[in-house]
Amino acid sequence: MDFAFTDDQELFRKAVGAFSEREIAPIARECDERGEYPLSLIRKIGALGYLGAKFPPEYGGSQAGLVSGAIMAEEMAQASPGIFLGIYVHVYLALSAVAAFGTEDQKEAYLRPGIAGDKIGAWAFAEPDAGSDPGGMKTRATRDGDGYSVNGSKILITNGDIADFLVVTTVTAPGQGMRGLSLIIVDRDSPGFTARRLHTMGMRAAHTAELAFEDCRVPADHLLGEENTGLASALRTLTEGRVIASAFAVGLGRAAFNRSLEFAKQRLAFGQPIGGFQGIQWLFADMATRLEAARLLTYQAAWRAEQGLPYITESSMAKLFASETATEIAKTAVLIHGGAGFMMEHDIQRFYRDCMVLEIGEGTSHIQRNTIAHQLGL
Ligand SMILES: Cc1cc2nc3c(=O)[nH]c(=O)nc-3n(C[C@H](O)[C@H](O)[C@H](O)COP(=O)(O)OP(=O)(O)OC[C@H]3O[C@@H](n4cnc5c(N)ncnc54)[C@H](O)[C@@H]3O)c2cc1C
């Protein structure tokens, strides 16, 4: 067995890590406080080629694989979870779906500029009455002449009000339940489409929006994949996305852990650094062990995906364990900081507000447990 990154992966990790420290970390707090997403930074990241790590070279990518995708997620998320959330949804959900199921024209129109950072995408799956249960989806795409007329709404959509295009899951065969869903690409300027930003507890640098489609006209060639195969396409996209979400959680956990370790070495109580107390040392031992286990589950799932091995169970296990680990570490990190952990001028409160999304998005922890149990034959 080989647990080491290849030389190329190690070089990639160092380059992305240095970039994230230099360009993302310094603006993380300000973007959170102002609720601003740094779109110009996304173009810069695109120009460096990082957004194309998993895509084919003919569209500007480097086909470096999912392990490299996980490396990028871990490095960028530890610099700013809020900023990385927008990148995650753009690259690992919206662009991934276009790359996997798109026509040549769709790849030219969305994948190529998306990799360059010139266009940003969103993934519009969740609805007010259908989050965990896609069978409850109501947003309807009705064939009408040379296109579709889309009606309905989506909620909690990352990048929803800043995206140039959205990959929208719609009902195309009413009454067929999950077998009647299709993916459709909707351009931001489509007539009948509007988006309204929502206010969130955490990940405040990212934009989260509610979308409305009222007789929204979409050309027929914006259908992504075959009609009525949308659920299978969405699940395939989400399975891969969960591996990156796991690395995202490892990055967030690592950031909260590192800040706490520095703090515990400096903060004095009862005449010694608080890191000298065995009770505090055990907290660090547990956090370090969980973080390492989360990292191993994550990279194992990414490696299996790259090898073409089944990885549905591993992807859910990694997402479940890594997101719960990030929450546990963020909570412990606030406690270790004492009152300072509750103050807005310390970064640690931001990790605490950000972490819960990773247990909710891409399927909640309950849904991951359901998937794992289902894979066990239950
Ligand atoms: C900040 C943020 C960003 C998001 N970004 C996006 C995005 O970009 N695109 C997108 O499509 N969605 C996005 N989401 C939505 C997210 O995917 C959903 O919120 C999530 O899937 C849960 O759906 P729900 O909110 O409808 O909860 P529900 O499905 O109503 O679930 C409510 C509770 O019931 C539990 N539950 C439901 N069914 C079961 C079951 N069978 N067994 C056990 N427990 C169950 C759930 O685990 C949860 O605890 C985002 C959410 C947030 C908070």
Image: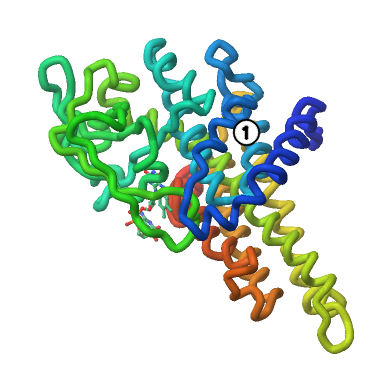
What residue is shown at x 25% (from left), y 34% (from top)?
Answer: 170
Question: How far across and down, in percent of the image, does residue 264 sit?
Answer: 80, 72
Question: How far across and down, in percent of the image, does residue 376 sit?
Answer: 51, 45
Please state which of residues 49 and 3 is positioned toward the viewer in this rendering: 49
170 up-or-down from 286: above or below: above
Question: How far across and down, in percent of the image, does residue 221 sit?
Answer: 27, 16
107 up-or-down from 261: above or below: above
Quadrant location of the N terminus in the rendered image: top right
Q: Secondary structure at mark 1?
A: helix
* Residue 278 appears in view: no
What residue is shown at x 66% (from left), y 51% (from top)?
Answer: 26
What residue is shown at x 59% (from left), y 67% (from top)?
Answer: 349
Colour style of the rendered protein structure: rainbow
Q: Quadrant of residue 346?
A: bottom right
Q: Residue furthest left?
A: 145
For the residue carrying disc 1, how many other residues have a C-alpha within 10 Å: few (<14), some (14-19), or many (20+)? many
**CB at mark 1 closer than 8 A to ligand 1?**
no
Task: Kindly identify which residue carries mark 1.
Answer: 69
Q: Is residue 58 left or right of residue 209?
A: right
Question: How far across and down, in percent of the image, does residue 193 sit?
Answer: 22, 36
Identify which amino acid the numbered label 1 is placed on. Answer: Gly
* Residue 45 appears in view: yes
83 up-or-down from 166: above or below: below
